[in-house]
Image (cartoon, rainbow, N blue to C red):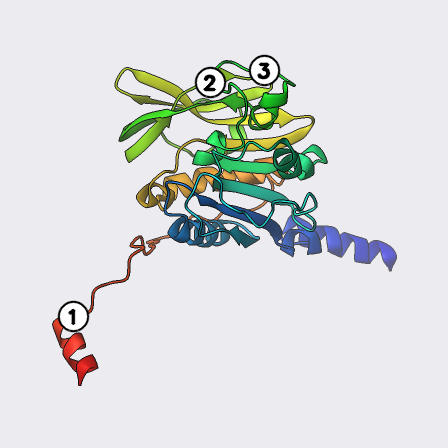
Amino acid sequence: MRLLASLLTLAGLAAGELTAADKKPLRALLITGGCCHDYAKQKDILKQGLERRINIVIDQAHSDDKSTKPPLPIFGKPDYAKGYDIIIHDECAAGINDPKIIAGVLAPHRKGVPGVNLHCAMHSYRSGDFRKPVKPGADNGKWFDYIGLQSTGHGPQQPIEIKFENNVPFITKGVENWTTQREELYNNVQVLPNAKVIARGAQGNRKAVVAWTNNYEGTRVFSTSIGHNNVTVADPRYLNLVARGLLWAVKREDMKLVKPINESFDLNSKPKPKSAAGKKKHQN
């Protein structure tokens, strides 16, 4: 009888029946806020876009502060990642240089929590003379050690031609080269030894790595410097790339990834003006 039950179970799995582990959604914490970007809108685009694609529930840790030193709700809480499978850093905290804060942000990743880093996360948590190549393990290089690449700035907003490389096949499976709309090409001061290039971008003669993975003390980390404008963040190709990078980081390459059809987002972060008729009706 036990043999029959085992055979039926195996048959069900072979037929594609999901186990309890497969049905359980991943849990992610998305961190947004700070300078220079429409995080109020982008945090929702990312949450909706990723939750549509993979079995994941995304919580948000957001600050409306638009300075380079946003008071993000994770600061002072080195256990902020408790209960999460992965942390998505999409903050722009370029002015945060307090070693204690930086150590606290890195604490979960040092303990093995995977990370995904988007756009201005590459220019956050910098200290000392970060414009010169830092040595691995240096006091002012701890965030770069985690990211796997050192970047200090960007050029003008122009389309970026993105070309993928096959160094991490799962992430680039089914992904095609494309040219973005207006975007910022982040420079590369150096690509660190444990990083693997996923994609390179070009704006005319300016070229740089724009997507990569990193082995951070045994923890998987995926990053892309693309993602300044809402139209890029809402691009299905961008969301597919981030979703695949996320699944790779949490070692769930077996999880199904859905590509939504006729997907749309509200990209306008400003309130829509009322029509003349609406104003008249309101006044009455």
Name the residue type under label 1: Ser
Q: Is residue 115 visible?
A: yes
Which residue is the extreme one toward the right? 1
Q: CA distance from mark 3 to mark 2?
A: 19 Å
Of mark 3 and mark 2, the one earlier in the sequence is 2
Residue 152 in the image: above or below residue 233: above
Q: Are marks 3 and 2 in contact (CB under 8 Å)?
A: no
Q: What residue does disc 2 label? A: 131
In which quadrant is the C terminus drawn? Answer: bottom left
Q: Name the element at disc 2.
A: loop
Q: Nearer the viewer, residue 2 or 163?
A: 163
* SS under mark 1: loop
From mark 1 to mark 3, how far is it between C-alphas?
Answer: 57 Å
The kind of residue on which mark 2 rests is Arg
Quarter of the image with the N terminus is bottom right
Image coordinates for residue 212, horizontal then vertical, percent = 50, 26
Residue drawn 77% across the image and 52% down it: 7
Q: Nearer the viewer, mark 2 or mark 1?
A: 2
Please determine whether, in this image, residue 14 is positioned above or below residue 111. below
- CA distance separating discs 2 and 1: 50 Å
